[in-house]
Amino acid sequence: MKTLINIKDLHASINGKEILKGLNLEVKPGEIHAIMGPNGAGKSTLASVLAGREEYEITEGSVDFDGKDLLELSTEDRAREGLFLAFQYPVEIPGVSNVNFLRTALNEIREYNGQEQISAKDFMALVREKSALVELDSKLASRSVNEGFSGGEKKRNEIFQMAMLQPKLAILDETDSGLDIDALRIVANGVNKLKTPENGAIVITHYQRLLDYIVPDFVHVLYDGKIVKSGPKELALELEEKGYDWIKEELEKAH
Amino acid sequence: MKKQSYTENELAKDLENQEYKFGFVTNIESDKAPKGLNEDIIRFISAKKNEPEWLLEHRLKAFEIWKTMTEPEWAHVEYVKPDFQDITYYSAPKQKKKYESWDDVDPELKETMSKLGISMEEQQRLTGVAVDFVMDSVSVATSFKEKLKELGIIFCSFSDAVQEHPELVKKYMGSVVPMTDNFYAALNSAVFSDGSFCYIPKGVKCPMELSTYFRINEGGTGQFERTLVVADEGSYVSYLEGCTAPQRDENQLHAAVVELVALENAEIKYSTVQNWYPGDKEGKGGVYNFVTKRGICERNSKISWTQVETGSAITWKYPSCILKGDNSIGEFYSVAVTNNYQQADTGTKMIHLGKNTRSTIISKGISAGKSQNSYRGLVQIHKNADNARNFSQCDSLLMTDECGAHTFPYIECKNSTAKIEHEATTSKIGEDQIFYCLQRGISEEKAIGLIVNGYCKDVLNQLPMEFAVEAQKLLTISLEGSVG
């Protein structure tokens, strides 16, 4: 079976400091992988590196994304190839309506893939359909990108954008942070409804609670720049219960 | 005896007069005045335009005043001062004959117009915009004149107005910007070549946007345009002014005067998209844009200035409102973009004289490259201006670490019932914002376009639709590859 993304021995550093120290991860179509780990383990770095943030230097390793060398692609081309990052802290863009922003994005992606521009009518129909999916007030769609949105609205807006752009692989970077239980449920429902046998997701989270709603196929523990433990969804519960110290201890014993 | 009283002074005078009569070097048929500025040149311009005596006198008086003035130094700009004797003050475009219809217009001129972005044909057909196209100081085409005529609206070149409506020109010219106002206004009053004139009669709402495209065409030709818009009682007009200039090496001086008169209950909306040649990436060349724009508001009237400024090497421009009448309203919406080595010192003056007068200032400055962008504004509340209100917002956006943004707000208040609010922000374009766009598949160029246009939305929203679209494109083009 083909892989959606195959990360091999990935090393990445910022300002000369190595954060990712040989990370391996493989995601196949239809799979949801959760990545958990203590603060500073490199979870958000992984998301940033995959999305193509320039501040990070890749010193070693490879990333194959659906048959393409991801690391050779520009940030925008990664997005156009179907890689989507739901930001931990979505950025506000004053004066730019969500609708205009998404239409620009969608058309750029379509152009890259040799498709025609979407008509205004079809686009608005898509907006209505997808905003319902994340219970996003259609008024928010016409407001400026994230401007004046509550924390929950921003996260829902990320999932709405994901629904609009229909990526092959979605990376959710601590999408659950700062959400109350209702917002969490809405966001998770959105992600679940968007799941298909063709696409996949990497869910980065600090807490197990999101995984009550988005049930992962695999759970990985990221610690000190590497995946140190992988397991079924039950691993998340164990982590929730026991914290990360036992993993640290296990690692130290092994050394 | 006559001979005895013939003094040296009189002799000199005679010789002078003779010189005017015979010593004039330039053929009146010539399309171009020789370089330099003196009384002869002014007389030449006036004669070329077959002007009445009072206008010639007006010009000569302005010239006398100008000679006593010095160039203003207070603006936050640095440049090599123009050599006023090295400028050609009049040149007419070559034309074989007057155009009977649009089809007769020289194809080269048409091409120039299409290079300006929107072809005149398209404008005529699609938008119902009447265009008075000014090229090197002489109007070459005027459209929709007949339709406007039915409503009694006068929209013509300034020269035509002098011939056909001298009483209006005489009454209002210089009534808002007197020739003594400043160095460049005095210069313009002396040597203005042409421009536009617009009069909206009492109670008439002008049904279409009136538009003028300016362009500097011939090398070394100074541009001294003059615009006068008079909205009579209870009338309304929306006036568009757009300009662009082709690339060239030498600096070109542009010193225009725009006067707006809004009589009781009238409203004037004046929109500008300015794209004069800004000079190359090293700062060589580019247009000097030293413009005096001012409007006067009588009772219950309103003047609204909207400008999108992306061009010129040096910009020195303060569209202003004198809120003379009670309850009158002045507005100023501005986007000023500077890139490379451009320098802009621009803003507005809101002079509150009448009671219950209100003014709004929204200024958005965008600096890129190594440019310097200054906002300079004055809000002045006079002692009889009870309950005057002003709201000012001045935002600056920096695209690089090498550019500069400056704000010089002046507030003078002599009435304790006034309410004045001033807000200002300075921010650098967010790398996070750009990354967010890139991550959604949007190219950097488009991302900057989106972010900048979003930042300017409050101003762009004030522009008429078709103009706003053009302005958005212009902003994006002006800032291509400018993030650093």
Image (tube, rainbow, N blue to C red):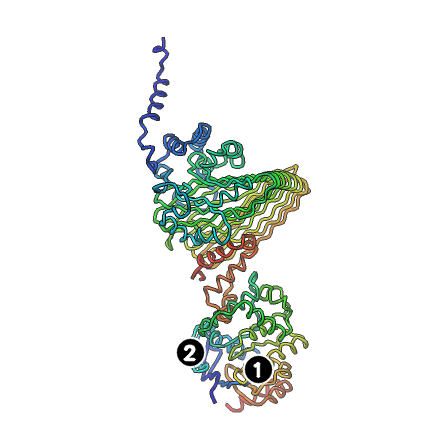
Q: Report helix, strand or loop for mark 2.
A: strand
Label 1 crowd (10 A; few <14 / some 14-19 / many >=20): some
Residue at 57% over, 86% down? A219
Closer to us: A154 or B265 = B265
Label 2 to label 1, Cα distance in Å? 33 Å
Closer to us: B398 or B466 = B466
- In percent of width and height, residue B414 lies at 64, 39
Label 2 crowd (10 A; few <14 / some 14-19 / many >=20): some
- In percent of width and height, residue B394 lies at 56, 52
Amino acid beneath label 1 = Lys
Instruction: Kindly tell me whether residue A159 is visible in this rendering.
Output: yes
**Which dot, 2 or 1, sits closer to the camera?**
1
Amino acid beneath label 2 = Thr
Left or right: B456, with A177 as reference point: left
Instruction: Kindly tell me whether residue B345 is visible in this rendering.
Output: no
Provide the chain ID for the residue under circle 1: A
Asked where in the image residue B191 lies, by quadrant, the reply is top left
Q: How many marks?
A: 2
Outermost residue, top direction? B1
Residue at 49% over, 65% down? B447
The residue to which callout 1 is attached is: A195
The residue to which callout 2 is attached is: A59
> In which quadrant of the rendered image does the C terminus of chain B lie?
bottom left
Provide the chain ID for the residue under circle 2: A
Closer to us: B29 or B39 = B29
Left or right: A14, with A134 as reference point: left
> In which quadrant of the rendered image does the N terminus of chain B lie?
top left
Left or right: B59, with B407 as reference point: left
- In percent of width and height, residue B188 lies at 44, 37
